[in-house]
Image (cartoon, helix red, strand yellow):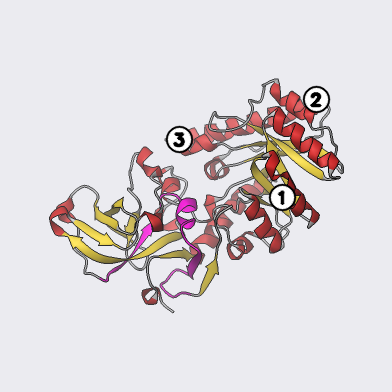
Amino acid sequence: MQLNELETPVLVLDRTRMDRNIARLRERLAPFGVALRPHVKTNKSADVARRLGPPGTPITVSTLKEAEYFLDHGWTDILYAVGIAPSKLPHVERLARRGARLTLILDNAEAAVATSAYALDHGLELPVLVEIDTDGHRSGVKPEDPALLEIAARLSGREGEGAWVAGVLAHAGDSYNCRSTDAIVAMAEQERAGAVRAAQRLREAGHAAPVVSVGSTPTAHFARSLDGITEVRAGVFVFFDLVMNGLGVCRTDDIALSVLCTVIGHQEEKGWLITDAGWMAMSRDRGTARQPVDQGYGLVCDLEGRPLQDLVMIDANQEHGIVRHRTDPAATPMLPVGTLLRILPNHACATAAQHGAYAVVAGDTGVEAHWPRFGGW
């Protein structure tokens, strides 16, 4: 089957580009001697995850549904990298009883007390990482915050019994807001130093804290030191996207994900091409709007995946996409109705989440497989 035989819109995955992206990060991290724990929230597909490593490879998830799905497909070493809510502990128990080695994270004493009590009452061993805030981006406690040791003290278990302090976790999410490679390098060092310092404080207080986990796709690609780090997490590196391109982490021809769509009409006086891929196909993500080059809802390519000069998806309705020349509406080529285009996404995670499967190609327009993916919680 060829791409031009598919009913649009379709999520297209270029396996050749994806494999190259995976190899690139593995090769980069190899000299540092750290483990790569890929984040599978981006792909939500066992077929994609197998390209990252066989079942048994450590992975990171963002939902317990992801944990359950990947456990069903043979992965057991799973880090659930969203702060645990006490109401989810019965689900955690079910996964653990089925053989998952599930590591949890938290950043407050209330969650620590609830997790510790549940583990002891139900005879569970639950490794717990305390989330560290190194950049003010989202969750976590500061490396020097007294709350770090207070939280750890509420985890009364030890390895092999109860909920115990397995270490720390940091996510340099603010790296997505950097404006230069030097800024990403500095952010990576800030992340590393903060996580290592937090782990040091825990160890000085008598906790084993063997795990020091950091990660984001930008910092994973630009960190110059990973001293004291045991594992690196990253997810969008598998596909890359326009936000990563805008940060200088990848080139446009590294982006492995696109949405195939069809030109269904024109508004010539406005310089518009109308396609059948709206925000339901692309998502509402406008991550590049904060970057020096705003790519609208996505960068437009031809059927072979080659960018068409200065064509972007400037607007989106539910099932309609509007494509136009970036700066000059009169320069928009009025491509015939029926023309197939591929749109590179701003945010691979968000765009992939709109679809139930990947049409897999390998550098051309021949479809070699359809790989299912899942969504929801």
Q: Position of residue 258 (x, y in %)?
A: 41, 60
Q: Residues within 10 Å of mark 1 (few under 14, many from 20)?
A: few
The residue that disc 3 covers is 178
Q: Secondary structure at mark 2?
A: helix
- The amino acid marked with disc number 2 is Glu
Distance (Cα) linking label 1 and label 2: 33 Å
- The amino acid marked with disc number 1 is His
Q: Secondary structure at mark 3?
A: loop
The residue that disc 2 covers is 204
Horizontal relation, residue 132 to residue 174: left or right: right
Q: Earlier in the sequence, mark 1 or mark 2?
A: 1
Q: Quadrant of the N terminus?
A: bottom left
Q: Quadrant of residue 303?
A: bottom left
- The amino acid marked with disc number 3 is Cys
> 328 or 127, which is in the foreground?
127
> 127 or 250, which is in the foreground?
127
Nearer to us: label 3 or label 1: 1
Q: Residue at x 70, y 23 (%)?
A: 147
Q: In the image, which residues are magenta?
A: 338-367
Instruction: Please tell me whether residue 277 belongs to the stretch shown in magenta.
Output: no
Distance (Cα) linking label 2 and label 3: 34 Å
Contact between labelled residues 2 and 1, with CB atoms less than 8 Å apart: no
Give the label on residue 91, or none.
Answer: 1
